[in-house]
Image: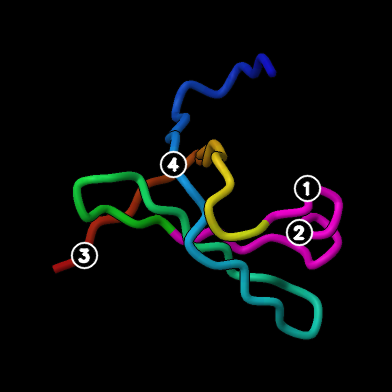
Amino acid sequence: MKLSARNQLKGKVIEARKGETTAHVRIDLGNGNVVTASITNEAVDDLALKPGDAVVAIVKASNVMVGK
C-alpha cells in the first residue's frame, strides 16, 4: 500500500470495540504507546480487524492542537 500521507504508525491491534455506528480501534505502537482510531463498523468488518493484527495507523491532519 502506497500513500501520500507521511505520518504512518506501525502497530498491532489491541482491541476493536464496535458501537452503534463507529468502532474504536486501539493500536499498540510499542514502548507503551497506544493510539486509538475511530472508524466505521463497516471498515472494521471489511478489514476483518482482530487483536494481534499488524496494521498501520495513518494520520492526515491539517491542524494540531496542544493543551495544558
Identify the residue position indicated by label 1 in the image.
47
Identify the residue position indicated by label 2 in the image.
44
Identified at 21% across, 55% down, the residue is 32
31 sits left or right of 61 in the view: left
| Local crowd size for mark 1, using a 10 Å CA cut-off: few (<14), some (14–19), many (≥20) | few
Identify the residue position indicated by label 4 in the image.
11
Q: How far apart are marks 2 and 1 (CA)?
A: 5 Å
Q: In which quarter of the image is residue 29?
A: top left
Q: From the image, which quarter does the C terminus lie in?
A: bottom left
| Residue 16, horizontal then vertical, whole percent | 61, 67
Q: Give the range drawn in magenta.
A: 36-49
38 sits left or right of 26 in the view: right
Identify the residue position indicated by label 3 in the image.
67
Counting residues from the start of the chain, the first of labels 2 and 4 encountered is 4
The foreground one among 65 and 48 is 48
Look at the image and tell me whether residue 35 can be seen: yes
The amino acid at mark 2 is Val
Q: How far apart are marks 2 and 3 (CA)?
A: 31 Å
Identified at 53% across, 52% down, the residue is 52
Marks 2 and 1 close (CB-CB < 8 Å): yes
Look at discs 3 and 1 and give the one toward the viewer.
1
Taking the view exactly as shown, the residue that stands out farthest to the bottom is 20
Counting residues from the start of the chain, the first of labels 3 and 4 encountered is 4
Image position of 45 with respect to 18: above or below: above
| Local crowd size for mark 4, using a 10 Å CA cut-off: few (<14), some (14–19), many (≥20) | many
